[in-house]
């Protein structure tokens, strides 16, 4: 059985993962509107990944006999000044999610809930990947600067991203 504390914390994380998805879907729509279809594709896949994170936690909560409580998803921003602005916001957001996962991990240890701790290992690894991917993208954007041909190539490259279900 799950403790009430863990059950509540997992429900909170499920909501946070859906919020992340909503944030990235909003970014996808924003860049689709700007004609950057590759970037829109990248964020749409990011949205799918976040849904997978939420569902993995939701399934786990069910498996442990917990009650899933879906609460309202807060508003997300709807526009960004630039690509750099959106990817910096993505990086900052992912760092925040990493802190949330770490806190959840710490709570699982406190509660001696080793199954939850083990489940979270995949999420810890996933966050390393998220931060690394976005760091590479920001590095590329710094190199490209305002170069139009560079941005065109960047958008084409972002169009290549395919969805792979995270292994959670
Ligand atoms: Mg996530």
Image (cartoon, helix red, strand yellow):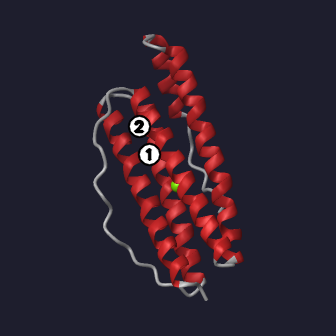
- In the figure, is residue 129 to the left or right of 29? right
Kindly state the secondary structure of the residue where label 2 is placed: helix
- In the figure, is residue 114 to the left or right of 155? right
Quarter-of-image position of residue 146: top left
Residue 45 appears in view: no
Q: Nearer the viewer, residue 109 or 38?
A: 109
Quarter-of-image position of residue 32: top left
Badge 1 vs badge 2, beta-carbon distance below 8 Å: yes
The residue wearing badge 2 is: 40
Kindly state the secondary structure of the residue where label 1 is placed: helix
Q: Residue furthest front?
A: 110
Q: Nearer the viewer, residue 106 or 51?
A: 106
The residue wearing badge 1 is: 44
Which residue is pictured at 44% across the width and 45% down the height? Answer: 44
- Distance between the Cα atoms at labels 1 and 2? 6 Å
Q: Is residue 137 above or below residue 12?
A: above
Residue 7 appears in view: yes
Which residue is pictured at 48% across the width and 41% down the height? Answer: 92
Q: Is residue 73 above or below residue 111?
A: above
Residue 78, given in percent of the width and then of the height, sits at 28, 42
Residue 124, given in percent of the width and then of the height, sits at 65, 56
Which residue is pictured at 36% across the width and 26% down the height? Answer: 82
């Amino acid at each position: 059985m799950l403790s009430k504390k863990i059950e509540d914390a997992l429900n909170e994380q499920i909501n946070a993962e859906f919020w992340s998805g909503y944030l990235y879907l909003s970014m996808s729509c924003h860049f689709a509107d700007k004609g950057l279809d590759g970037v829109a594709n990248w964020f749409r896949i990011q949205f799918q990944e976040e849904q997978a994170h939420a569902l993995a936690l939701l399934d786990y909560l069910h498996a442990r006999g917990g009650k899933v409580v879906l609460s309202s998803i807060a508003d997300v921003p709807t526009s960004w000044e630039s690509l750099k602005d959106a990817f910096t916001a993505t990086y900052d957001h992912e760092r925040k999610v990493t802190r949330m996962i770490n806190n959840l991990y710490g709570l699982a240890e406190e509660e001696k809930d080793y199954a939850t701790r083990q489940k979270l290992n995949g999420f810890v690894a996933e966050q390393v990947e998220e931060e690394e991917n976005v760091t590479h993208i920001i590095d590329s954007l710094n190199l490209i600067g305002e170069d139009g041909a560079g941005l065109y190539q960047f958008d084409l490259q972002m169009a290549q991203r395919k969805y792979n279900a995270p292994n959670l």
